[in-house]
Image (tube, rainbow, N blue to C red):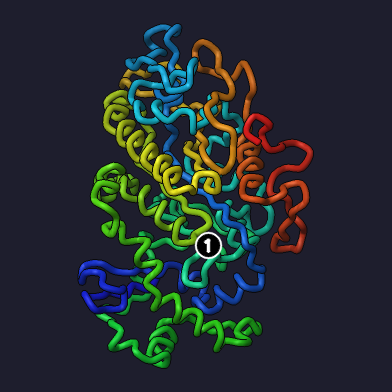
Amino acid sequence: MLSILGNRIGLCDHLSRRAFLQIGGLALGGLSLPQILQAQQAAGTGSSRKGVIMIFLPGGPPHQDMWDIKMDAPREIRGEFTPIQTKVPGIEIGELFPRLASISDKLTFIRSIVGASGSHYAFQCLTGHHDRNQPPGGWPALGSVLSKVYGPKDPAVPAYVGLSPKTRHAPWGDNGQPGFLGVAHAPFTPHGDGKGDMVLNGVTLDRLDSRKTVLASLDRFRRDVDQSGMMDGLDAFNQQAFGILTSSKLADALDFEREDPAVIERYGRGEDKLQSDGSTRLLTNFLVARRLIEAGVRCVSLSFSRWDWHGNNFGRARQDMPMLDQAVSALIEDLDQRGMLDDISVVVWGEFGRTPKINGNGGRDHWPRVSCAMLAGGGMRSGQVIGETNRLGEHPISRPVHFQEVFATLYRSLGIDVDHLTLPDLQGRPRYLVEQNAYRPMPELV
């Protein structure tokens, strides 16, 4: 990753000395930024205004303490929370989500997600597929698909940005992997561990006032030059790379302090540090996600906290759920007020649910049989609940919804026809984005 520090008159367009622009993924797999730009151009660039924000709750959030409260269950299953009425008559959700309850007409709650692989990381929530029996190169994340199909909206802004930190479970972070689409479509990670790979400390416009200087700096840090012919036309792509490095557009989007203080307060700040388990509770990432989408990013992924609560489930819920309620409701309202909600889809979910029965440590354990999700925006129908679980929250008794159905719906909202579009894997075999003749966009939403 390349970090360019600025001062008040520096490269990052009036950012403070302590602020910086981190350009991620410049050396992924030995590829420089110009090479990545060339690969993206080869894929073709579309004109879609659509986008998506993917919010992953790593560890498996407890569905029966969030949006599927079971008041008729025994106490050892029901837990400590009660439901509250939402803006939509007849829909109730957990008491720790009053702000989401107040905008439920803009949301859809799915209480019957099935098909979880049981793997303890973000793969299925970001690709729609199991991590087993993958095609050569592996399944790509939705953001990588958008990067491949549409390319960047703006040459100075990447198509796919991942705000989640790298964890021991996910070498790409909880952002998704490019799979068989290749590193040219990997998520740009401004908070990633790779930020030390390429660092130009203290470089300002005075030192980067000529194109030769910045190209020489990039060349010093590049790995092996690709000899496959990919570097044909290098001059044009180096110029584009220079445009990204010297543009303030990405820096401005990442610098949330430029927002009205009232907007920042609405989102909240959370905890500005990584937790010991590699997770983050930084609420400003939700605001940065909106700013990135507004700047032209097609897909932003982020994660919030770590939900693997084998103990103290209800204590952790009282800490984290109000924070999630605040940030997600602020994001939905902000997108709506800016006239962006019809174009931008939002999905909130985790990799699986939690056991109905509370264990001896006051926690809930892993439960892949059913989980929950929340959707908003993207022109999807809202103000509804889809699916129902039994009295104990063990399994669906109506309308089970597979991960791939959600992805088929998201792709449709993004203007991609999953019945016709295929992308070649590393052996050149065409691959559909969802399993054909098995999963379709959800009729309740489209």
Where does the N terminus fall, quadrant-wise? bottom left
Which residue lies under the disc numbered 1? 159
Q: Position of residue 335 (x, y in %)?
A: 44, 46
Q: Position of residue 114 (x, y in %)?
A: 60, 29
Q: Is residue 290 visible?
A: yes
- What amino acid is found at the position of numbered circle 1 in the picture? Ala
Relative placement, left or right, of 131 versus 33 is: right
Q: Which of 320 and 29 is in front in this view?
A: 320
Relative placement, left or right, of 130 versus 436 is: left
Image: 14 above or below 71:
below
Q: Quadrant of the rendered structure where residue 17 is?
A: bottom left
Relative placement, left or right, of 145 versus 224 is: right
Image: 124 above or below 219:
above
Q: Where is residue 234 in the image (x, y as percent from the top left)?
A: 57, 86
Q: Nearer the viewer, residue 120 or 430?
A: 430
Residue sitting at 51 percent across and 54 percent down?
Answer: 299
Q: Quadrant of the rendered structure where residue 202 is?
A: bottom left
Q: Can residue 166 be seen in this view?
A: no
Q: Which of 206 and 56 is in front in this view?
A: 206
Residue sitting at 48 percent across and 21 percent down?
Answer: 88
Image: 446 above or below 285:
above
Q: Dot 1: what SS? A: loop
